[in-house]
Every structure is written in structure tokens, then in C-alpha cells.
Image: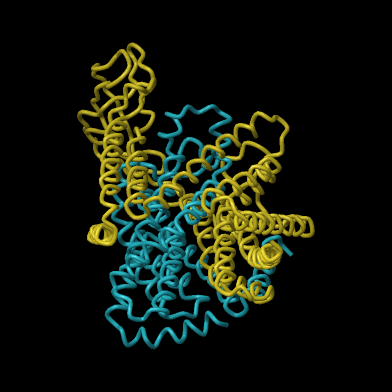
Chain colours: A cyan, B yellow
């Protein structure tokens, strides 16, 4: 057996043991997301326009991440709407920033990996970079949206008469509680993956000026910063969607809490 | 923007005290904007020569076709520029550049771009080394910090502080690693992780029993995942692991891979343990008679709804990052299997190990919290 298959099996068993059926479904969501990512690359390879392909794949990834393994309809639907809106809003940042920063493709540090390869492949790496950034932020957006909407759904259950405005303010408060740990998740997630690059920089004594203009480093840093921005927009956006949805549909939200309540007391 | 204004009004209406805070925020945001503007004109502090492009003339595109029948085109640019720093400031120079439509390692330049160039030597044309990118970094950093202060107030400041301090620690750790010639990068980063976790949790939670419990849970969850992975590595003889697929490797790849995995998952495991332990503390405060077993089960309930999204956060970061190189491999006539193996397989294994850490931290955090919290109640009773 390969290391991969044993680790995958162990992860499945662990998620099943800890999360039951919900955990097993969450494991499946990983597999589905991987298939979607690979499919995106293959479609781009066949010269389909990268951005529309990514947006469709991204929407499905958000759907899979949010709905798989979560039973609470009320908060998941809110989180899904909010995160799709955030993905589109973030694109308004990503496109001009990537055009301006010119960090698409590969840097000098990649030379060794590129040896003997043809670089003139006829697909714009700028567009590919935009897709990469969009996809890498989706997990963080989905997670933050879920945290806010499930917190708000809890508050709404306890006070069904709460006004939309108050709910929005509460959403920001929940956001304050999660922002520190969420930023650290992203910081370590990104920088852990690039430890080797940083060892390279420090080992070869790059100056600060060189590092902050280096193509590979700036590309990575922009990804972290754009994810931060994604999470930061997600907080008010989820709060706004929640107050809009639950304020407009008082009848439905009075029914829904029963479901959430059972889930909590379980 | 509307949301932003609404939030402002809301806060001002409820607590008029905050209006002065808003002025402070506004001044800080504007001052930051000025700093960004400063970075756009910071060429004089660089020692490398920088030129500003004044005119560009594109020649006709030349068709390119490679052995894999990929169609592309290259364009040669004749560029006039003026030096904006060093003692040659103001000198006019001519440069040239060739870019391809795909732009894997090249890019078109436009009028107004600032570029680093090679040292000026008489009778020779300088080369463009690359665009100046510090302004866009400064601008985005400013946007992040401004949004943090506007939406999150003091919580935003703490988040910023912890990320900033971690970045400094990260840099120090790499320096320590490189100064120890024969040091094992994994051992060093394992030790540093303890400091990372302690510092971050201290900043987020303050120094309390809750922090100690969260820290214990984080460290044991992560350690457990790494130990299990090492056992799996040994039992399977690392079959199907392709260290040659790792990028930018300058030292032994195996400890480096483990260190990357450890650091990568640390934030997510902390995130989760914080949530679980905080919820259990709240539960205990509301219902002091809750039993250890009930606490354990509640912890598991909190954990299982967040583990899926958290694993996906890391998974998407680790795998999406390999996109450009994967595409290049596919376009260079490699099959899916080889492309996956060389580019994505290590990221996937990293996600699996991180996933194990995230899942195992749930019972560990619930267990540690349910035992240690109860002890506190007993000592409180004794007092």
C-alpha cells in the first residue's frame, strides 16, 4: 500500500469515528473538491476560458464545502449566498491587483523546475494566476461564512424577534471573535507551504528590497493578503445576508429553529 | 460600502463614546494611505537602478510553435525610459523586452511602469530585471489593515499583532535554522511551533487556564498527527511519496516536508481547539453541574461541524498553489498520472496529515478540557 492510501484511510476512519455520518460526508467533500480542482485544470488545458471555468468550479466547491456534512439548512444557505457574493466581490480586487503586480507564471527561483520545458503554451498565465488566487481563498471564505451564519442562527433561535439591524451588529461581533484565529490559520497555512522558499531567501541573503519585489514572494504574499481581504469582506456580508434573509422571512425562520435546537441539544 | 456606513451609524447610535474612536481610525487610515503613496515614490532608497518607462514601441508579433503543437506569439518591445534613482538620475536610456502571449516568465511593459535594470555600463544596453512590485504589496497591506480597524476595532488590532509577531518569529526561526549548520529543520521548527502556539494563544485569549488547556490540546493534537504519519511512513516505506516534486528545496527534503506540514496545520488546529475549549468553558459557566462526559460529548459536537470546512481551507491552499506548474506539465505532453505525482501528490499528502491533526485535536481538546476544567471547579470549591 502507498503512503497516500494508508493516510487517506486513516483520515477517513478518524473523521468517521469523530463525526459519524457527518464526518464521513465531510471526507467525501475533500475528494469531490480535489476532482473539481483537477477538472478545472484539465478544462483550462483544453483552452476553455479560465475565469468562467473557475467561477463555475468555485461555486460548486463552495457548495460542496458548505453543504456537505452540515445539516442545518438555515445557516448553510445563508453562508452559501454570502460566500458566492464574496467570491465575486473579491474578483474585483484580484483582477486589477494581479494585472498590476505582474506576478503571474514563474520566477527565477523556479528555473530548476522548468528545465527542458516549453514555456510558450499559448494560455495566459495571468488568467491562470487569477484562478489560482480565487480557488485558494475559497476555503477560508466558506469557513468564515459558516462560522458567522451558524453563530447568528443560534442567536436568532434564542431571540426570534431580533431586528435585522441588531442581527447585523451581532454578526460583526461574532466576526471579532473569529478574526484572530482565522488570520492565523491562513498565515500558517500559506507560510508553512512556503517554508522552503523563505529558507532559500534567508540562505542566499536576499535584501528586504529584493524580497518585496521578488515575483514568487510577492505572488505568495498577495495570495495571503487577498485571502485576508476575502475573510474581512465575508464577515459583514454574511451578517447582511443573514439579517436580510431572516428578517424578510419571519415565518420560515420561526420554523427553522426547531431543527437547529435538536442539533444543539443532541 | 453601504454595509460599512451602516456599521458606522449603528455603532455611533448605540455608543456615542465611539465617535472619537472613529476619528482616530479615519486619521490612521488616511495616514496609511500617505505611506502607500510614499512607497510608490521610494525609488531613491533603492541601491539598484530603477527606470521609469516613458515610451514603448511594439514590433509585430512573431508566431511560436513548440514540439507539442502549442501555439503562441512573442512580441518585441523597444522601450525608452528615464532613470529615477542613483547618481545617474534623469539619464535617458533605451531598453528592450520580449514578451509572450502566455507570459510564463516574461511580461509586457507599459508607459509609466517602474522597472529594476542592470548596472549601467558605457556602450552597453541595460537589461530589465523586473518590475518594481513593492507598491502593490503596500497598497494591499493598507487595505487589509484599514478593513481590520473599520470592522473589527480592537479585535482587529490583536489579530494584526499576532500575525505580525508570528512573521517576526518565523524570520528568526529561519535564521536560527540556517546558523545551525547541522541542525534538523524539523526538530527546530517543532520547538519553534510551541513558541508560535503559546504566543498566538496568549495574544488571542490572554493568559488564563483556558489558554493553557487550548495550548495543551493544540500541541498534543498536532504531535499525535505527526507521530502517526511517521509510523505510516515507516510501515509503507514512503511508497508513492515524491520528494522531487517539492519546490525550492535547498536542504534535506524529508525534514523540510515535515516542518512545512507541521507549520501549515498549526494555525488550523489552534483555531479549532480555541473554538472547542471556549465553548466548553461557556457551557460550564452556564451549567456548573455538567458532567465530564457531557463536556466531552459537547466538545465533539462543536468539533465535528468545523472540521470539514477547516480541512478544506488547508487543502485548497496546498493544492491550488500548484496550478500553474501543473498546467505547464500537462501542456508539455505529460500524462495525468505523472503530472499529479510531480506537482500535486505532496500537497495532497500534506493535506491528509493536516487533516489528521485537525480531526484528532477534537477528542484531545474535548478530553483535556473536560478533565482539567473539572479540577478547577474542585479547587474553587475547596477555597
The residue shown at (39%, 20%) is B47
User: Where residue B159 sits: x, y (%)?
Assistant: 45, 49
Residue, x 58% and y 50% (percent of image)? Answer: B207
Q: Say which quadrant the N terminus of chain B sits in.
A: bottom left
Residue that sits furthest to the front in the current view: B383
> A132 or B297, which lies in front?
B297
Does B368 sit left or right of B70 as displayed?
Answer: right
Q: Position of residue B205 (x, y in %)?
A: 53, 54
Determine the residue located farthest toward the top in the rendered image: B122
Name the side, left or right, on which B154 lies relative to A244: right
Q: Position of residue B223 (x, y in %)?
A: 70, 55
Do we see residue B341 in this rendering? Answer: no
| Picture layout, residue B157 above or below residue B111 | below
Taking depth in this image into account, of B273 and B64 the one nearest to the observer is B273
| Residue at horizontal 70 percent and vertical 29 percent from the top | B181
Answer with the quarter of the image where residue B25 lies.
top left
The image quadrant of residue B170 is top right
> In front: B292, or B315?
B292
Residue A26, placed above or below residue B252: below
Measured along the vertical axis of the image, is residue A112 above or below residue B2?
above
Q: Position of residue B358 (x, y in %)?
A: 61, 62
Q: Quadrant of the C terminus of chain B?
A: bottom right
Q: Is residue A102 visible?
A: yes
Answer with left or right where residue A65 lies relative to residue B150. Answer: right
Amino acid at each position: 500500500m502507498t503512503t497516500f492510501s494508508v493516510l487517506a484511510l486513516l483520515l477517513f476512519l478518524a473523521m468517521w469515528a469523530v463525526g459519524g455520518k457527518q464526518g464521513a460526508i465531510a471526507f467525501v467533500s475533500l475528494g469531490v473538491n480535489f476532482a473539481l480542482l483537477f477538472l478545472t485544470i484539465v478544462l483550462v488545458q483544453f483552452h476553455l476560458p479560465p475565469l468562467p471555468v473557475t467561477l463555475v468550479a468555485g461555486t460548486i466547491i463552495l457548495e460542496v464545502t458548505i453543504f456537505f456534512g452540515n445539516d442545518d439548512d438555515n445557516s448553510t444557505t445563508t453562508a452559501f449566498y454570502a460566500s458566492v457574493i464574496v467570491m465575486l466581490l473579491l474578483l474585483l480586487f484580484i483582477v486589477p491587483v494581479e494585472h498590476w503586480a505582474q506576478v503571474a507564471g514563474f520566477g527565477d527561483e523556479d528555473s530548476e523546475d522548468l528545465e527542458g520545458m516549453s514555456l510558450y503554451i499559448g494560455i495566459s498565465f495571468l488568467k491562470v494566476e487569477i484562478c489560482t488566487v480565487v480557488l485558494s481563498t475559497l476555503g477560508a471564505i466558506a469557513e468564515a461564512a459558516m462560522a458567522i451564519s451558524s453563530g447568528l442562527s443560534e442567536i436568532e433561535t434564542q431571540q426570534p424577534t431580533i431586528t435585522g439591524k441588531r442581527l447585523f451588529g451581532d454578526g460583526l461581533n461574532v466576526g471579532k471573535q473569529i478574526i484572530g484565529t482565522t488570520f492565523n490559520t491562513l498565515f500558517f497555512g500559506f507560510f508553512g507551504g512556503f517554508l522552503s522558499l523563505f529558507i532559500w531567501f534567508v540562505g542566499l541573503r536576499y535584501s528586504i528590497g529584493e524580497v518585496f519585489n521578488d515575483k514568487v514572494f510577492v505572488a505568495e504574499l498577495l495570495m495571503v493578503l487577498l485571502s485576508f481581504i476575502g475573510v474581512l469582506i465575508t464577515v459583514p456580508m454574511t451578517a447582511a445576508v443573514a439579517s436580510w434573509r431572516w428578517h424578510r422571512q419571519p415565518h420560515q425562520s420561526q420554523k427553522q429553529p426547531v431543527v437547529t435546537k435538536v442539533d444543539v441539544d443532541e | 460600502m453601504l454595509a460599512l456606513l451602516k456599521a458606522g451609524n449603528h455603532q455611533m447610535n448605540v455608543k456615542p463614546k465611539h465617535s472619537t474612536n472613529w476619528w482616530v481610525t479615519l486619521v490612521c487610515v488616511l495616514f496609511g494611505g500617505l505611506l502607500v503613496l510614499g512607497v510608490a515614490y521610494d525609488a531613491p532608497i533603492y541601491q539598484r537602478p530603477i527606470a521609469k518607462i516613458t515610451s514603448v514601441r511594439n514590433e509585430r508579433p512573431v508566431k511560436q510553435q513548440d514540439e507539442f503543437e502549442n501555439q503562441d506569439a512573442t512580441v518585441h518591445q523597444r522601450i525608452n525610459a528615464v532613470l529615477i534613482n542613483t547618481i545617474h538620475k534623469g539619464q535617458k536610456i533605451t531598453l528592450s523586452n520580449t514578451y509572450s502571449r502566455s507570459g510564463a516568465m516574461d511580461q509586457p511593459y507599459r508607459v509609466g511602469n517602474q522597472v529594476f535594470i542592470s548596472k549601467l555600463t558605457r556602450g552597453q544596453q541595460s537589461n530589465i530585471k523586473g518590475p518594481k512590485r513593492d507598491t502593490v504589496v503596500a497598497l494591499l497591506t493598507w487595505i487589509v489593515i484599514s478593513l481590520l480597524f473599520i470592522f473589527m476595532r480592537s479585535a482587529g488590532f490583536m489579530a494584526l499583532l499576532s500575525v505580525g509577531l508570528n512573521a517576526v518569529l518565523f524570520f528568526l526561526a529561519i535564521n536560527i535554522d540556517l546558523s545551525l549548520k547541522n541542525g534538523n529543520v524539523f526538530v527546530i521548527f517543532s520547538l519553534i511551533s510551541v513558541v508560535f502556539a503559546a504566543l498566538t494563544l496568549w495574544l488571542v485569549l490572554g493568559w488564563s487556564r483556558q489558554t493553557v488547556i487550548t495550548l495543551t490540546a493544540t500541541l498534543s493534537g498536532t504531535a499525535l498527527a505527526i507521530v502517526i504519519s511517521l509510523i505510516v511512513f515507516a510501515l509503507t516505506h514512503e511508497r508513492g511519496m515524491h520528494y522531487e516534486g517539492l519546490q525550492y528545496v535547498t536542504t534535506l527534503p524529508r525534514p523540510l516536508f515535515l516542518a512545512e506540514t507541521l507549520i501549515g496545520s498549526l494555525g488550523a488546529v489552534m483555531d479549532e481547539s480555541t473554538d472547542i475549549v471556549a465553548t466548553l468553558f461557556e457551557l460550564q459557566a452556564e451549567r456548573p453541574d455538567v458532567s465530564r462526559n457531557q463536556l466531552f460529548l459537547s466538545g465533539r459536537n462543536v468539533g465535528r461541524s468545523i472540521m470539514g470546512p477547516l480541512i478544506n481551507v488547508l487543502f485548497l491552499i496546498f493544492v491550488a498553489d500548484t496550478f500553474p506548474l501543473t498546467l505547464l506539465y500537462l501542456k508539455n505532453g505529460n500524462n495525468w498520472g505523472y503530472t499529479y505525482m510531480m506537482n500535486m501528490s505532496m500537497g495532497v499528502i500534506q493535506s491528509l496529515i493536516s487533516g489528521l491533526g485537525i480531526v484528532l485535536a477534537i477528542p484531545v481538546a474535548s478530553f483535556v478540557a473536560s478533565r482539567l476544567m473539572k479540577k478547577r471547579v474542585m479547587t474553587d470549591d475547596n477555597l
